[in-house]
Amino acid sequence: MAWELVDSNSFSTTYSTAFTLVRNGGSTSFIVLTTSGPEKSITLDFQKYRYRLRVLIYDLQGRVKSTTLTCKGTTSAYKSGNDVTFDKSDDLSGFSIVTDTNGGPNLTFTTIIERISLANGKLKDQAPGTVINFAGSPWTLLEPSTGYLFKNTHVGEMKFDNSNQNVFGTSSIRSYLNNEYYNALSAADRSLILQKIWHAGLPNKESEVKVTARVGLLSHSEWTKYFADTILSKPTEPFWTLTPSTNNSVYRVVASGHLLADYSPGLAGVYVRPVLCINPETNLINGTVVHNATPTITLSSPTNNQTLYENDTFNIAGNAHDTDADQSVTAYYQINNEPRKVLATNLSQTQISLSKQLIFKGSKLFDGEVAITGVLADGVAHTLKVWAVDSEGGQSTTVERTFYVVPNRAPLLAIDAITPSGIIDTDKFTISGTSGDPDANANVKVSYRINAGNAVDIYDGSGGAWEFEVLLAQLKVGENTIIVEVVDNYGAKTSKTIKLNKNTVNTPILQSVARHKISPPKGSARGVLIWVQRDEDLDLTVELSMTLAGEQEQYILLEADPENIVEVSEGIVEDEYYHETVEPKDNIILKLTTSRANVNIDNKIYLIWGVLE
């Protein structure tokens, strides 16, 4: 964050006239008073910004003039161009700059007021150099990751050590900072301060001496670094570091920003600027530390890098907790950049159970029947985020899980080459093929439909070969459509269409074969006596097969006894046939073959009957 200009104003006045800045309107405005012009009102917003004032003072020769500064009840020397920062907690009603009386009648004053946004969010997420309000005072953030702070104002002047020793670990200044000063802070402030190991050795050997404490001082190398990085600026008064020198003195930072080792640790006149670490997870609201413990959250499910297949359950499970009393805590979850969803809400100081079951189907995640995401792409890492927020604005760390999806893919269907055959409606041919599914644990069903007929199921399983027979009688004359469809257990379908033409071929036949199965009333028979009434000129061949069930048919030719041919009526006769086996048989087939010499002959069979024994 950078300072931005709010107001700049120049005017001339005499040496003996004071420049005064008066607060007006509580936390909303200031009025700049001058002796050479009208009052000027400047509106300030302390809810969002921190402000600083710089005053440039020159005489007619362009020389910078020294002044006396009275601010916040303290009078001190003020050098032209130095910053005075202030926020809503500062009382500037007594702010004045009075010039000296040497060097001429006129001075040029230029007042510059700038502002910088107040910090919000977690301390660890702020930029180095950010000014925050902690324990009622402004501090500069040196290291966001550790919450390392430098106090912008001193806590008074004192000796480094009452025994005139330059060892920080046993010094009276360390004792003061970690006892009187530390204990004077509120319990809430003390709870945020962390133990730290301070490097208190000689320059370039600082890490050789380590001191554990909660409050300390800057070291030689720290001041050098932060001053060079312009995170810290020249002080208005000298202050102690914790770094000793070899001549039993202690390095101090002087107004020029230089480090001097010219002061005995037993002398007063040097100020104390504490440094300390507070919890980097601490929340800031408008630049001020919020004494509110942030919620904590843990996830037991899902695991990281989980892969979801069609109809898989995406379980979100874990716990949230907040140690503060009398607050409400709301846990949220979010998929990718979709709107956040409430996971659970409960009171603080209770173990809040987190549980949500989402279903992956149709390339989306569903909460019940409501889709909470758009289409999730295959092969792309998707993100689940879970966090908790308490009623004071404290937010937990965000727990993230990466997951992948494999949307349901259409089942596979292949049809073998089709060779339709047959010349009469009782003839049939076979259509066959294979089915499958590229997804794991899938089940597929295959069915077919001829023209506008009903679907007929022919396969149900994990995938494999299928076939069905088509009777010519099922086809109409002309174009026929046979649709074969495979459906997986998640509703994805694949279908293929077969088109066949059935032609009418009226070709007379000269020979016909008919088979008749004979079912014995008692289940089996040894002998068969058959009578056939026919046209006398009909050319008829009679064959009979008598086998056991499951055995191949074995036909023998039956001869009619010429002596027993009976005339039934004119042109119609009755033949008698008989056959007997040794053992009873249960699979009895009668085969009749009729023939004619040309299409003009129209002889026929009129009646077939018989008995079994």
Image: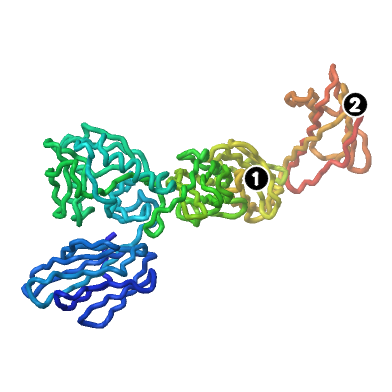
Disc 2 and disc 1 in contact, CB within 8 angstroms:
no
Q: Which mark is residue 447?
A: 1
Residue at 70%, 49% in the rendered image = 474
Residue 326: image location, x then y, percent: 56, 51
The answer to whether residue 333 is above or below residue 608 is below
Amino acid, disc 1: Ser
In-front residue for pair 291/298: 291
The answer to whether residue 100 is above or below residue 39 is above
Horizontal side of 556 relative to 367 (left or right) equals right
Instruction: Specify the quadrant of the image occupied by residue 411.
Output: top right
In-front residue for pair 606/326: 326
Horizontal side of 25 relative to 368 (left or right) equals left
Q: N-terminal of the two: label 2 or label 1?
A: 1
At mark 1, the secondary structure is strand
In-front residue for pair 396/528: 396
Identify the image quadrant of the N terminus. bottom left
Amino acid, disc 2: Lys
Residue 126: image location, x then y, percent: 33, 53
At mark 2, the secondary structure is loop
Residue at 11%, 37% in the rendered image = 247
In-front residue for pair 157/431: 157
Residue furthest out toward the left: 61
10 Å crowding of disc 2: few (<14), some (14-19), many (20+)? few
Disc 2 versus disc 1: distance between alpha carbons? Answer: 40 Å
